[in-house]
Image (spheres, grey):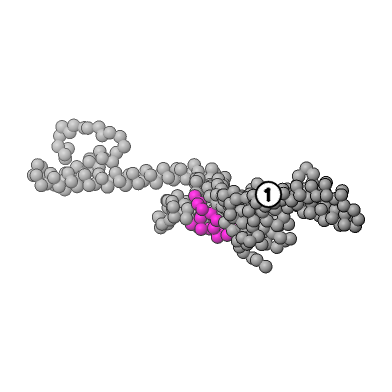
């Protein structure tokens, strides 16, 4: 018994146009034989030939079920009375044994834009994260027999048919469920950002292509069971959950203010040092330690203050 995808035997796959011509000619010959030849015969031979003609006529009608047309990036899974016989991926118009069941599969790439879901990151913070997945069916055996594709639908006459659109929708649902599971797993492995822990080298926010690659690998591991390959997976939405968004925004603002203040202080200290060095090198004025302390204090207030400094004219001395 075959347990993996195999190519359908070429000798069982006949060109469709020549077979269509043969069947039409046989139809015409059978009809002509029954209309013009049988009435002129007599005896037991007439009954025997009539039965043969009826059987041939019924077989020719059934033979029309053997035709199939395969477009680019489509496939037919061939089943003979419950036994998998192979997959046809060649494009064109063909004829096979009409008793084969031909399950249609679409191999074209498809997009899945998943709605953002709420998960907890490595630090336990609730976040909203979404993804876009580009996927396609690559293994027709696994896609047909290893998962339930729920492809059977009922017509108004109560006849069960194999609906390829419903089948592809079931694959899309399978990808969505596994995609959400993979996204939750990846989001739980990494922090949203490194604002709470500077030791985090890789975060959801700064991971970029590396994070997308990790997500893609997780999806491929989960979807290999269904014969589905993920061509690309990207995180397209990332934000804190609404209940903590305001608090995290204030924290980010505080971090930004602290970082800005640190840079301002570093720059102010450098400017004060440079000013004292220039005054000392060029001998403009001699400053003792007390005057230097006063000058440093005044310069730092001017350089680090948020408001513009208001000049004050000192009519006395630095000591009075």
User: Which residue lies under the disc numbered 1?
Assistant: 21
Left or right of 4 on screen, residue 292? left
Q: Is residue 185 visible?
A: no
x and y percentages locating residue 272 in the rendered image? 20, 45
Quadrant housing the N terminus: bottom right
Label 1: which secondary element: helix
- Could you classify mark 1 by the number of other residues whose Cα lies within 10 Å: few (under 14), some (14-19), or many (20 or more)? few
Q: Quadrant of the C terminus?
A: top left
Q: Residue furthest left?
A: 283
Please tell me whether residue 226 belongs to the stretch shown in magenta: yes
The answer to whether residue 310 is above or below residue 13 is above
Question: Bounds of the magenta span?
Answer: 214-234
Is residue 286 shown left or right of residue 162? left
Q: Residue 315 at x, y = what percent?
A: 15, 32
| Residue 200 appears left or right of 285 | right
The residue lying furthest to the bottom in this view is: 1
């Amino acid at each position: 018994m075959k347990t993996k995808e195999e190519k359908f035997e070429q000798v069982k796959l006949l060109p469709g146009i020549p077979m269509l011509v043969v069947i039409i000619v046989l139809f015409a010959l059978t009809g002509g034989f029954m209309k013009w030849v049988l009435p002129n015969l007599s005896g037991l031979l007439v009954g025997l030939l009539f039965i043969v003609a009826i059987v041939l006529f019924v077989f020719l009608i059934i033979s029309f079920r053997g035709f199939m047309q395969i477009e680019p990036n489509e496939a037919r899974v061939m089943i003979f009375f419950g036994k998998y016989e192979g997959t046809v991926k060649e494009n064109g118009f063909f004829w096979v044994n009409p008793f084969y069941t031909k399950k249609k599969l679409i191999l074209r790439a498809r997009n899945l834009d998943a709605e953002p879901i709420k998960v907890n990151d490595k630090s336990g913070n609730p976040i909203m994260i979404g993804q876009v997945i580009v996927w396609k069916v690559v293994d027709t055996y696994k896609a047909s027999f290893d998962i339930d594709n729920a492809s059977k639908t009922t017509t108004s006459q109560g006849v069960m048919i194999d609906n390829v659109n419903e089948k592809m929708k079931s694959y899309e649902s399978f990808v969505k469920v596994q995609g959400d599971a993979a996204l939750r797993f990846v989001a739980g492995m990494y922090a949203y950002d490194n604002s709470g822990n500077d030791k985090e080298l890789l975060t959801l926010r700064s991971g970029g292509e590396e994070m997308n690659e990790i997500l893609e690998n997780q999806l491929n591991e989960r979807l290999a069971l269904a014969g589905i390959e993920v061509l690309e997976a990207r995180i397209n939405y990332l934000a804190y959950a609404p209940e903590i968004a305001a608090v995290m925004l204030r924290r980010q603002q505080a971090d930004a203010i602290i970082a800005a203040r640190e840079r301002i202080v570093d720059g102010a200290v450098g400017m004060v040092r440079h000013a004292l060095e220039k005054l000392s090198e060029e001998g403009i004025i001699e400053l003792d330690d007390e005057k230097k302390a006063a000058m440093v204090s005044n310069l730092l207030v001017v350089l680090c203050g948020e408001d513009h400094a208001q000049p004050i004219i000192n009519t006395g001395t630095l000591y009075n």
